[in-house]
Amino acid sequence: MHPLLIVVMFTLSAGIAMPLGAALASVEHIRPYWLESEFRHSVVAFGGGALLAAVALVLVPQAIAQLSPWSAALCFCAGGMAFMGLDILLYRMKTSASQLAAMLADFIPESLALGAAFALGGDGALLLAGLMMLQNLPEGFNAYRELRKATAYSRAKILILFTAMALLGPLAGVSGYLWLSNSPLWVALIMQFAAGGILYSVFQDIAPQAKLNKHWAPSLGALLGFVLGIVGHMLTVV
């Protein structure tokens, strides 16, 4: 199979996880109520665990191999500051799509890095693709709930919107494959920038929403998301 087709296949699969997560969130009224509540919080925590795994096992290790300590630190902090700036902007605009914006803000640079990683033949490409799928599922879940609560958008309209956004993954992935494959430094900078932004998002948006008073099971979702990243990492480096 042509490498470009592989890039399209993996980035599209990662993107389709967003409408799949939204479809899962559209299933209302799981009974009993306590199970519905714990399930929803566990899904959010699972996404946080998968995001942390992507940062710790793929993005940062791949990036720092090409960067000096100072450039790695500056780029990482720049990613976190950029995501913070986006949060502040969305708050001041009083928009109801902060989760949606955050989801796209990490999906697009990750897709760029994924396309370039496939071109460079790095061992982390398959793991990054898998973790992107794992994280986009709960992110789509959470973004759907936010839009349904704060807007008049119908279930069908949101699912169509999320499906259309999934196409941004192949566009970014092919761009990364074609234009960044000969620029490992730029790939490293994008990965480190995305890692900083993702880490900011985990503690600003995901972790607070995952907590459920007097319930402890949701936190296990974060462990499960991270341990899947560990297993994937161990399988890809063997």
Image: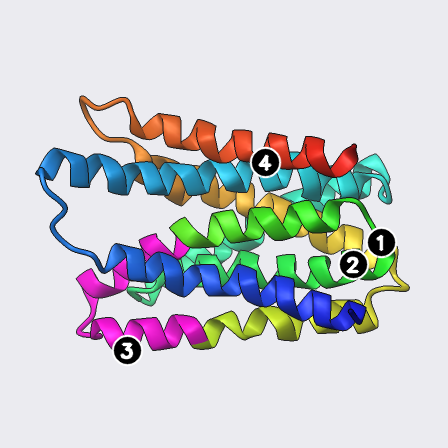
Q: Mark on residue 121?
A: 1
Q: CA distance from mark 4 to mark 1?
A: 19 Å
Q: Which residue is denoted by mark 4 in the rendering?
A: 229
The residue tagged with tag 3: helix, strand or loop? helix
Looking at the image, which residue is at 37% across and 76% down?
161
Instruction: Answer above or below: position of 211 versus 197.
Output: above
Pick the front one: 68 or 194: 194
* Residue under the point 51% across and 64% down: 15
Label 2 crowd bin: few (<14), some (14–19), many (20+), radius 10 Å: many
144 inside magenta stretch:
yes
The residue under label 1 is which amino acid type? Gly
CA–CA distance in space, label 2 to label 1: 5 Å
Report whether 178 appears left or right of 148: right
The residue that disc 2 covers is: 118
For label 1, the SS is: loop
N-terminal label among 4 and 1: 1
Q: Does the CB distance between marks 4 and 1 fall below 8 Å?
A: no
Residue sitting at x 80%, y 71%? 2
N-terminal of the pair, mark 3 or mark 2, is 2
Question: Which range of residues does the magenta coloring cover?
Answer: 139-163
What's the amino acid at mark 4? Gly
Whole-number angstrom distance, CA of label 3 to CA of label 4: 32 Å
Q: Looking at the image, is 155 positioned above or below residue 85?
A: below
Q: Nearer the viewer, residue 24 or 97?
A: 24
Say what amino acid the circle numbered 3 marks. Lys
Instruction: Name the residue that disc number 3 marks.
Output: 157
